[in-house]
Amino acid sequence: MEEAKDVQFEIATRDETSLINNDREDVVAGVSILSEDEVIALERAVPLLKRAKIAALQLTTSNDWGDLGGKPYMKASGAESLANTCGISWNNARMEVRKFQDEMGQYVEQYICTMTFYIKDRMGRIKRSIEVDGMASTDDDFFSERTNRETREKYRLPFSEVDVNSVRKKARTNCIERGVRKFLGLGGVTWKELAAAGIEPADKVEFNKGGKAPSAPSPEGKNTRAKLWGMLLDLSNGDEDIARAGCKKYSSFTGKDGKPVGFEDPNNPKISDKWVGTTYSKVEKIWREKGFDKIPPTPEPEAELPETREPGQEG
């Protein structure tokens, strides 16, 4: 039997088959299929890869891991420890910043740090390299959310009070953590694997179930939604299609992908009261500028009284 070849995976769409060797007989519909020798080599490697994963985990300690929302995650200390032990280096660090507005119209900066991670052979030549990015944003709870000491209510800091330098550093840290995990195949580590390595996370961070999904509209919020829709109808002369288009226009903000995000129906329960309130303020200003607040409301038609009937009369 021939010596097992290096296992390589190549995936491409039908339109991208030029990226791989089309002369090979095992290329079907744009996806390369492993040869029999490659499959055998992969099967033989499975137990070794599992052992290597457990060995990498055993190089870390409990303090290098945490419980994040019910899932294990490796901290920066664990990533740097493994990088030093396994000879992983990184360079070509680039920092990109994306600027946009959130649904409340607040200014946000998102930092994306990209690095090249690599290892060298005994001759000092790069043996393998990958490129990984890590992100952090000024609207992350850690940087922008605070708690009032007296009322214990949470509130958001304005952008001017957020430590932007710390956000940049966090993007770099996240990049290193992701790069080392990806390089060593430690993505998606399970509790069972950590237990096999004798590791129990030192701390735990819990999230509310359901994430940040908006709560059901409050009674005040329902009233605001009704008023907003009424003003939109005033501005569109009662045309609901134009009113929906206006709602989307005034509720729009630039999303993280650089595209506008907005809603057409203020009565949609998936839209938060805060977003509706921000849109209401914009529309109300225009509504007043157009003089609609000076137009007296249309009086309700008086109810018709039933005809009187004397006792004994037939109905």
Image (cartoon, rainbow, N blue to C red):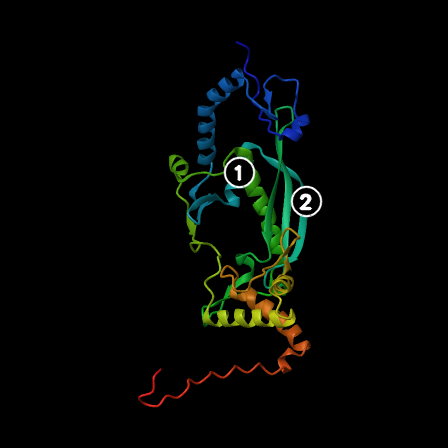
Quarter of the picture holding the C terminus: bottom left
Residue 175 vs residue 24, the one in the foreground = 24
Label 2, label 1: how far apart the Cα atoms are: 19 Å
- Above/below status of 14 relative to 278: above
What x and y, as percent, mark residue 219? 46, 71
* Residue at mark 2: 94
Q: Amino acid at mark 2?
A: Arg
Residue in the picture at 57% in, 39% down: 179
Residue 275 vs residue 57, the one in the foreground = 275
Residue in the picture at 60% in, 72% down: 231
Q: Few, some or many C-alpha atoms within 10 Å of disc 2 (few <14, some 14-19, many ≥20)?
A: few
* Residue at mark 1: 181
Q: Is 136 displayed left or right of 153 in the figure?
A: right
- Above/below status of 104 relative to 128: below
Residue 209 vs residue 151, the one in the foreground = 209
Q: Amino acid at mark 1?
A: Arg
- Above/below status of 298 relative to 33: below
Numbered disc 2: secondary structure: strand
Q: Residue furthest left?
A: 312
Residue 242 vs residue 211, the one in the foreground = 242
Do tag 2 and tag 1 residues touch (Cβ < 8 Å)?
no
